[in-house]
Image (cartoon, grey):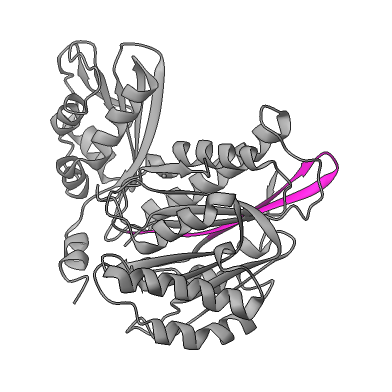
Amino acid sequence: MKKINGGVAAPLGFKASGLYCGIKKSKRKDLALIVSERLCDAAGTFTTNQVQASCVVVNKDHLRDGKAQAIIANSGNANCMTGESGFENTRSMALAISRILGLRKKNVLVASTGVIGKPLPIKKILTAVPQLVNDLDRKGSEAAAQAILTTDRMPKEIAMEFLVGRRKVRVGAIAKGAGMIHPEMELHAPKHATMLCFVTTDAMLTPSALRDALDRAVQKTFNTITIDGDMSTNDMVVVLANGMAQNKKIVEKTKDFRQFTHVLETMFLSLAKQMIRDAEGATKFVEVFVKNAASREDARRVSKSVARSSLVKCALFGEDPNWGRIAAAAGYSGAHVDPWKMTLHLGKEPVLRNGGRVKQNANALNRVFAQKNIKITVDLGLGKSSATAYTCDLSTNYVRINSAYRT
């Protein structure tokens, strides 16, 4: 397994493009397209927010047969809570791509990100579609990655190559996300500001193996991050697999399946960490590691509870090692917590043991919270399960950005 260049266009048979169509006042790229030469097996995970953008609802319908061939995405407008016209506009985007490329409309997926409740300037998008298609290129991943950004400061893309038997298999991805990030996505199969991730691969897999690998990877990566505790209406991770590597078909419960899943996890974790480092106003990258929990779910609850605590995040920004806020967040997480058995470490420095504070040099703790990368360890002392969450601090710049996001 090795990193390669090319992003979503690295796998065989994929091209991408991105351009400015007139949605963003900044005139930054705001429309992206990813297309496969062949019809793909496809799967997606989507937000569990009960308020869902039209693109999420439409994509779930389009993925009922587990097939797709193209993804069109716009930034600068979420096209959410825009009534029936919002759904019509989402379908119009899919139809426009399908007509010019000769695809079935249901094989085109759509994504939107940006301001909620604002009508989508669909005419600008439809006018730009011919040029968007004309710009498709094997070197177009970076342009597509730039075109899906909102408050992000940098594009996020990655690609990897590995062997299945003697065949080279490639996986590529682009993502965005810097605010309104607290994903709780679940698998949608035909039978889960915003985070978006689009994945391409030339691997040949069974549909069930593709869905299972995606779900496992998302649960261990994107669903472990939080920037501000706000779950988006538009979150999605979509993967297209066209099989052009012509490898032996990957099936579940095999070495090849475990390897493919591991590749997805590695890529997704890299992208997830990039989101945290690129978070709105962030000055700290924080890892919350919970160990010796009674169950995996308890470990996950505590890690996410600490990671999303506004008080903990403010303390991180102020470089104030107020560990009592960490203990409190663990206690209200809903997990089984015994304060007499719980221990806390800030970096390598112990601060809580046997129900009370550990006498500590204040300067040592201050040095930990002055760092750009901080690890918080919560040992529950109740079992053998563990989980990790990733987060950032909550800064005055975050408040500035989001106090005037719409205006």
Above or below for 403 versus 2: below
Q: What stretch is highlighted in magenta?
A: 157-178
| Secondary structure, magenta segment, majority class | strand
Where 306 sits versus 28, above or below?
A: above
321 is higher (above) or lower (below) than 159: above
Q: Residue at x 20, y 50 (%)?
A: 317
Q: Position of residue 395 (x, y in %)?
A: 20, 56
**254 on left or right of 388:** right
Residue positioned 37% across, 82% down in the render = 23
Q: Where is residue 387 in the image (x, y as percent from the top left)?
A: 39, 28
Q: Quarter-wise, where is residue 345 in the image?
A: top left
Q: Which of 148 and 272 is in front in this view?
A: 148
Q: Of 43 and 202, which appears nearest the observer?
A: 43
Which residue: 61% across, 37% down?
262
Q: Is residue 219 above or below residue 359?
A: below
Residue 269 pos. (x, y %) = 49, 44
Magenta stretch encompasses residue 387: no
Q: Nearer the viewer, residue 3 or 57?
A: 57
